[in-house]
Each structure stands twice: as C-alpha cells, then as structure tokens.
C-alpha cells in the first residue's frame, strides 16, 4: 500500500487560514489501511480543526467526505455537487489523490493534509515499513523475494557492504541488512548457490531515470 | 464571582471503574456531580474520536477509566486505551488545548474510594485549568 502520515496541525491550519468552509476528503484505500486518511481520520482532523478554530473565536465549517478511491476520476466526480460551496478542499489521500482532485476542480484550491511516505507493508499493528520503490523492473525473483533496492540503504545489487553487523544495517540497529535477509532466505530455499550470481548494472530508465512514467494498456484504453 | 463548574465526561469500563463508581455510591462516598459517566464494555472500546467529540461538544475534561494493568477482562484493552489517550494528548497539544484535560486512570471494581478520590482530584484540576478554550471561543463567536 501507499503509506502516509498526517502533516503537523500548524502546517494544515496555515494552509486553510482565511477559509470559512472547507471540504475534508478522505480515501477508502491505502490511507485508510495505514490509518492516515480514512473516514475515522477525517472525522478526527475535522474535530481538531474545528476545535482549533473555535478556540480562536473563528467559525470554520468543515464538511467531511470519504471517497472510495481518490485517485480515480469516477469517484472524484462525487465531489462536484459540493465543490462550489467551499473555499478549499483539504485532501487526506496520498499525493495521487490530491493531484486528481486538483486536476478535476481547477478553480478550488486543494491542500494536502498528509505527507505521502512510501510503498510498504504492515509489520504489525501500527507499524509500516518500506518494501518497494517502484523501480519498474522487479528483481525479487533473483533475491529470494527481498528487495535490495527498497530495503538496502545503499541499494546495493550484489551483496552487503562492510557496514552490516549481526544482520543489522550500519544506519541503525532497528534496520535489517537486506542482503543478510536475502542470504538467510536463499539458504532456507536451498538456493544459496545462486547468491554469487552477478546481477548486472540496473537500467534505471524503467524507474524515475526516464522522467514521469505512464502505463498504457491499449486493450483497456 | 461564581465558581466555574466543569463538565467532566468519564468513560468507565463495565468491569471495573463503572462498578467502582457503584461501589462509591454504596459506600456513601461523595464525588463531584460534574462527572458524567458513560459505561463502556472495556476502556479499549474508547476511541480517540469519542474523546475528541466529547471535548468538541463542550466537555472540559475527559477521564478514561479502565482496569488495573494486567487485569483487563479483554486482556489488553486498558493498555490500548492508554496508548490512545497518550496519542490524543499529543494531538490536543498540537491544536493548543491542554493535554491534561484528558487522563487515563485505572482501578479495580472494589476501589470505590479510589474512584471518588480520582474524580474529585480531576474535577479540581480541571477547575484550576478553567473552561475548555473551545467553549470560550465558541461563546465569543456566538456573541459577535
């Protein structure tokens, strides 16, 4: 999922300063799962913004909506009947959702309430960790299902650097060495002989190296 | 000058604090009438949103009262409640509301005396803090 965290309240309040009526829009997808921008977080932020405004003796009308998916125009369209009644939209989606709302409604300012973080997985209640950097040319089949691009601090492609100790990365004791994990996994799979296969220099054009990316499926377009 | 009488909302776990409040009554102990009790099946059932809504709607202080540590009927509901209260205290500070307005407390069902003492002390603390600033701002807004 795409993970995110709420921005500091000062920053959010600064963005909507001067607005009398805002539309606070959540998303039912990734940001709901990582407890950053779902229906509940929308309600919590709405209450917080209203309390902060009332404390200052200012009126703020916060309307709450949570879309099924804020990155799809079909769902963003649901905002259309409400958009002219508000001074601004505050989006609690990832950056994709914010931009999709901004693209559809050109005359209404759209502000992000979240900082989008990374593509990750849940390691337990309340813990999300980075797992994928969307390099566009997946090599998990070569590395025992553990990604050295997302999980090695140096993105090394052929074994660990000299900084790992007892399976932990030199950047912090709470960070696993990706190549240690890969080695352990390969041993479990009985394919450790493949560990020394050299992975060729990566062609980063499939990643961000070739500019913003787009997928075109002609059978669906 | 008229003394400020705060409104305190106390979310009380059915298995401990709610019974402790009952016990306080049976023991003829006095605790402030400012405390409005809401019975919940477990303190772990209390969501951050419930507490926020209580404050938004005008409560001056909120107590979340659960079982003693290790004694939760649902194993760890009271631990989770404490985590939520701690999170919410940080959130309240971010929006300029005193974190002390929300507090997590624990007790057993037999601790009627402790319930009376905690609610009395908390009411006094909130009285010293003064009205919820949200209410004060709302009044200014209504007057303008």
Image (cartoon, coloured by chain):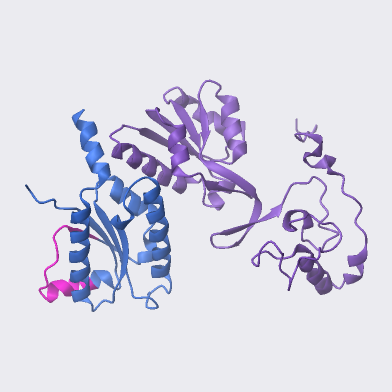
Q: Nearer the viewer, residue B80 or A174?
A: A174
Which residue lies at the image location 60% right of the left edge and 44% below the top edge? A116
The residue drawn where x is 26% and y is 70% is B17
Q: Is residue A71 left or right of residue A140?
A: left
Q: What's the magenta region? A: B20-37
Residue A137 image position (x, y, % from top left):
83, 47
Above-or-below relation of A94 to A20: below
Left or right: A197 in relation to A31? right
Give the x, y percent position of residue A124: 58, 64
Chain for colour purple: A
Q: Is residue B81 above or below residue A52?
A: below
| Quadrant hosting residue A152 | bottom right
Residue B123 position within the rendered picture, expressed as x and y whole percent measured from the top left: 19, 60
Q: Is residue A77 above or below residue A124?
A: above
Residue B79 visible? The answer is yes
Does the stretch in magenta take in B32? yes
């Amino acid at each position: 999922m795409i993970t995110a965290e709420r921005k500091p309240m000062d920053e959010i309040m600064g963005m909507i300063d001067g607005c009398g009526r805002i539309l606070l829009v959540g998303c039912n997808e990734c940001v709901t799962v990582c407890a950053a921008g779902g229906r509940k977080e929308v309600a919590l932020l709405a209450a917080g913004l209203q309390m902060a405004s009332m404390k200052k003796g200012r009126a703020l009308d916060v309307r709450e909506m949570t879309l099924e998916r804020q990155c799809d125009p079909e769902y963003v369209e649901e905002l259309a009947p409400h958009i002219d009644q508000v001074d601004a939209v505050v989006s609690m989606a990832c950056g994709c959702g914010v931009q999709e709302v901004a693209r559809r409604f050109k005359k209404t300012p759209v502000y992000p309430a979240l900082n989008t973080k990374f593509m990750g997985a849940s390691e337990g209640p309340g813990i999300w960790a980075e797992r994928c950097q969307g390099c566009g040319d997946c090599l998990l089949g070569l590395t025992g299902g553990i990604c050295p691009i997302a999980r090695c601090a140096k993105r090394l492609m052929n074994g660990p650097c000299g900084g790992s100790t007892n399976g932990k990365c030199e950047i912090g004791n709470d960070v696993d060495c990706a190549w240690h994990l890969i080695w352990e996994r390969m041993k479990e799979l009985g394919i450790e002989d493949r560990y020394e296969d050299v992975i060729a220099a990566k062609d980063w054009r499939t990643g961000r190296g070739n500019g913003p990316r787009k997928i075109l499926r002609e059978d669906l377009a | 000058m008229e003394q400020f009488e705060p409104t305190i909302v106390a979310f009380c776990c059915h298995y401990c604090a709610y019974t402790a409040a009952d016990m306080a009554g049976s023991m003829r102990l006095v605790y402030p009438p400012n405390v409005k009790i809401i019975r919940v099946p477990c303190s772990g059932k209390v969501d951050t949103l419930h507490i926020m809504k209580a404050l938004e709607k005008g409560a001056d202080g909120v107590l979340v009262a659960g079982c003693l540590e290790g004694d939760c009927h649902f194993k760890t509901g009271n631990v989770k409640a404490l985590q939520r209260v701690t999170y919410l205290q940080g959130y309240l500070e971010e929006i300029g509301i005193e974190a002390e307005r929300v507090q997590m407390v624990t007790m057993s069902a037999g601790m009627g005396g402790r319930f009376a003492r905690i609610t009395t002390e908390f009411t006094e603390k909130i009285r010293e803090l003064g009205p919820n600033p949200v209410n004060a701002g709302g009044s200014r807004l209504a007057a303008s």
